[in-house]
Image: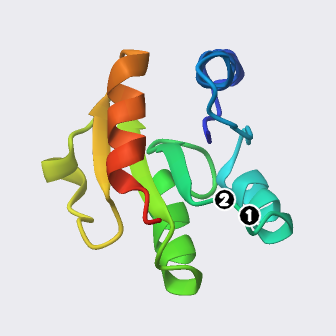
Amino acid sequence: MVDDDRDLADTTQTLLEILGIHCECAYSAEGALSTLESNSSINVILSDVIMPVLTGLDLAAIIKADRPLIGIVLVSGYTSLETIGAREYVDGFIAKPYKIEDVIERLIGAMRM
């Protein structure tokens, strides 16, 4: 889970963990890249689109260039998948506010076993 809104990131992480899904949290794209570097077991990433410095799209492009099998699901309250136009990097999109059921469905759909 990557989101600069710490409360949303922490809440989403808690809900996923309650449902039995291990989740690590990062509050920036840079933090996510650091976590990814130290944890090779990550197979899907849920990331906000609009973040300072590196956006969720930047993060997706960097990750896909290095580890193309990692699933990427983007979330945003400001844009849509059609607007961001980065289909080659994105395996799913969810509009904010979202339901945890939608998150789980998209994460499972984006995983590559």
Residue 28, horizontal then vertical, whole percent = 69, 46
Q: Residue at x 42, y 43 (%)?
A: 107
Instruction: Farthest residue to the bottom: give it.
Output: 65
Q: Nearer the viewer, residue 29 or 93?
A: 93
Q: Is residue 46 above or below residue 76?
A: below
Q: Residue at x 78, y 53 (%)?
A: 31
Q: Is residue 66 above or below residue 15?
A: below
Q: Amino acid at mark 1?
A: Leu
N-terminal label among 2 and 1: 1
Depth check, mark 2 against mark 1: the one in front is 2
Residue beneath disc 2: 42
* Secondary element at image label 2: loop
Tag count: 2
Q: Amino acid at mark 2?
A: Ile
Q: CA distance from mark 2 to mark 1?
A: 7 Å
Q: Nearer the viewer, residue 106 or 64?
A: 106
Give left or right: position of 31 versus 79.
Answer: right
Q: Can I make out residue 37 in this image?
A: yes
Give left or right: position of 85 versus 62.
Answer: left
Q: Can I make out residue 96 in this image?
A: no
Residue 113, horizontal then vertical, whole percent = 47, 65
Q: Is residue 24 above or below residue 6?
A: below
Q: Which numbered dot is residue 36?
A: 1
Give left or right: position of 69 versus 27.
Answer: left
Name which quarter of the figure residue 29 lies in.
bottom right
Instruction: Farthest residue to the left: give it.
Output: 82
Q: Is residue 41 above or below residue 46?
A: below
Looking at the image, do the residues carrying marks 2 and 1 touch, with CB atoms under 8 Å apart?
A: yes
